[in-house]
Amino acid sequence: MTLTSIQQSTPEQAATPPTFLPQAYLKNQFLPFDQANLSIATHALHYGTAVLGGIRGWPASDNPNRIRLFRLDAHCQRLSHSAKYLGCAIAPDTLKSTLIEFVRLNQPRFPFYLRPLIYTSSLGIAPRLHQVDKDLLIYGIPMADYLPKTGVRCRISSWSRQEDSSQPLRGKTSAAYIASALAKTEAVASGFDEAILMNSQGKVSEASAMNLFLVRKGQLITPSVDQDILEGITRDSILTLAKDLGVPTLERPVDKSELFIADEIFLCGTAAQIAPVVNVETYSLPRDRPLTTRLRDQLQAVIEGREARYRHWVTEIDLGT
């Protein structure tokens, strides 16, 4: 299996390819990354008929031979559910055991990102999901901060988020990322860091590859699941952490105008974790972000295994000595 990184690069960085983890997984076997190749006639390449996951891993601060994966079970469950849209049945436990073995074989001693992808692997040109083989691939890349922790500048995209009636947005489908790619490039080309997409009803949906939260009058607000969002695992984690901290939370439709008068806004996702927003279009947000900071610190404590209450969210893998 191969991994497509969501990580964005600037034109200056584009000439330098990322360093991939040495081992990949493709067609039911582990093999060197540079030998994990697909045919140019692969069905998924032409029709976006694939579903994907993204999982972060870090070495434990007290033991570099121990790796921590964040919410591996939830990621495997979502990828298993997403595969159903392709007519593919793969058990979460199968995904989990393969990913753990992948990490053990690669022996990473640095922060990294895993990309499992389930795709239509037959060779052919008919756009269909029946009578087409499906396979799993995995690859990984080193990954530090996806977005600057000091804050990101966002623009409202001219592109809209797709509707669930046109494609299954509760699945993490590769085809859905064309809107993300268009929005991200438009934002960067116009001098911003990130894009915010509206849905077809003109309500806030999400960023190019992240969910969005805002704070107003002490209340944490995020677009509800009926707003054509991806049901993000980091989003779910933040809602749980906030409720356990006693923070009032609300999932509901969000108007564009609310972004300009919010007390705080942040984006969240597996790659980004929590990234504060400093500007939306020409509107500047307050630099004092107490709730964003509190939630980011709490999430980091969970990832580092310092919060016993959420220990079940962290899968530890012993790499040996």
Image (cartoon, rainbow, N blue to C red):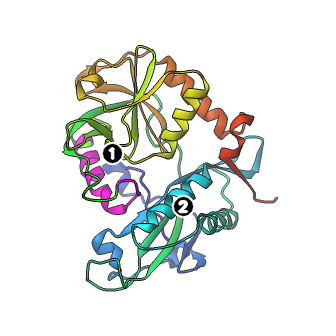
Task: Tell me the chief SS of the magenta region.
Answer: helix
Residue position for label 1: 208
Q: Position of residue 139 (x, y in %)?
A: 53, 65
Residue corresponding to mark 2: 140
Q: CA distance from mark 1 to mark 2?
A: 21 Å
Can residue 191 be seen by looking at this rendering?
no
* Magenta region includes residue 106: no
Dot 1 falls on a residue whose secondary structure is loop
In the displayed structure, 196 sits above or below 261; it is below
Residue shown at 65%/45% (left/top)? 313
Residue at image location 57% in from the left, 63% down from the top: 21
Q: Amino acid type of disc 1?
A: Ser
Q: Is residue 67 in view from this perspective?
A: yes
Q: Secondary structure at mark 2?
A: strand
Residue 171 is covered by the magenta coloring: yes
Could you tell which of marks 1 and 2 lies nearer the N-terminus?
2
Instruction: Pick out the residue farthest to the right.
Output: 321
- In the displayed structure, 265 sits above or below 138; it is above
Which quadrant of the structure image shows residue 25?
bottom right
Q: Which residue is painted at 37% across and 50% down in the image?
A: 9
Which residue occupies 47% across, 41% down? 272
Q: Nearer the viewer, mark 1 or mark 2?
A: 1
x and y percent of residue 50 in the render?
39, 68
- The span shown in magenta is 169-187
Q: Is residue 139 left or right of residue 281?
A: right
Q: Residue furthest left?
A: 158
**Closest to the observer, 257 or 194:** 257
